[in-house]
Image (spheres, helix red, strand yellow):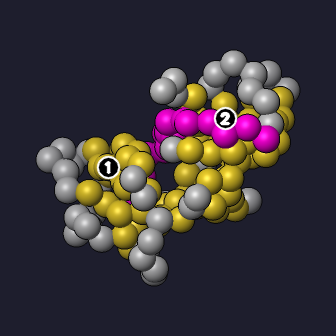
């Protein structure tokens, strides 16, 4: 996913957090790489490490189209659920970007849009 880093923040445990913007909206996540510069564009792998449970932190979306937004409780992501073979793993398309999810219980129609709330968000720079 292509993002622009807006701000950096170092937590008390020395973890590095970034606020970012993308074509799909704005968010916040833990940066897993060398210290980046703000204002620059980066290609990253977006990881959502939560265990997603239907009707807890994962729902059928009320609107179609990929979207990312920062909320006080975490990162709200809307994307298209892709067909899967493994009931415990799902793939979410956020535009052309694919994010793997740990999914527990419930079923949704592949191809439908879902919305989720992630609290464990990380960004890893990708060398192109």
Asked if residue 30 lies left or right of residue 2, the reply is right
Q: Earlier in the sequence, mark 1 or mark 2?
A: 2
Residue 35: percent from left, percent from top: 75, 22
**How many numbered marks appear?**
2
Residue 63: percent from left, percent from top: 46, 80
Q: Which span of residues is magenta-colored? A: 39-54
Q: Is residue 59 visible?
A: no
Query: Does 121 lie within the magenta span?
Result: no
Residue depicted at 80% across the width and 37% down the height:
38
Asked if residue 64 lies left or right of residue 69, the reply is left
- The answer to which image quadrant residue 86 occupies is top left
- Helix, strand or loop at mark 1: strand
For marks 1 and 2, give the CA distance.
21 Å
Please determine whether, in this image, residue 122 is positioned above or below residue 110.
above
Residue depicted at 63% across the width and 61% down the height:
25
Task: Tell me the residue that label 2 is attached to.
Answer: 30
The numbered dot on residue 14 is none
Residue 29: percent from left, percent from top: 66, 41
Task: Tell me the residue that label 1 is attached to.
Answer: 91
């Amino acid at each position: 996913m292509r993002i622009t880093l807006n701000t950096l923040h170092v937590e008390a445990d020395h973890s590095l957090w970034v606020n970012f913007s993308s074509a799909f909206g704005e968010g916040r996540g833990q940066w897993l790489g060398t210290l980046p510069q703000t204002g620059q564009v980066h290609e990253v792998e977006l990881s959502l490490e939560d265990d997603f449970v239907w009707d807890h932190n994962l729902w059928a979306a009320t609107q179609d189209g990929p979207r990312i937004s920062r909320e006080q409780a975490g990162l709200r992501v809307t994307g298209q659920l892709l067909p899967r073979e493994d009931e415990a793993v799902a793939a979410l398309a956020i535009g052309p970007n694919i994010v793997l999810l740990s999914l527990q219980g419930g079923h949704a129609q592949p191809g439908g849009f879902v919305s989720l709330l992630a609290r464990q968000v990380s960004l890893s720079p990708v060398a192109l």
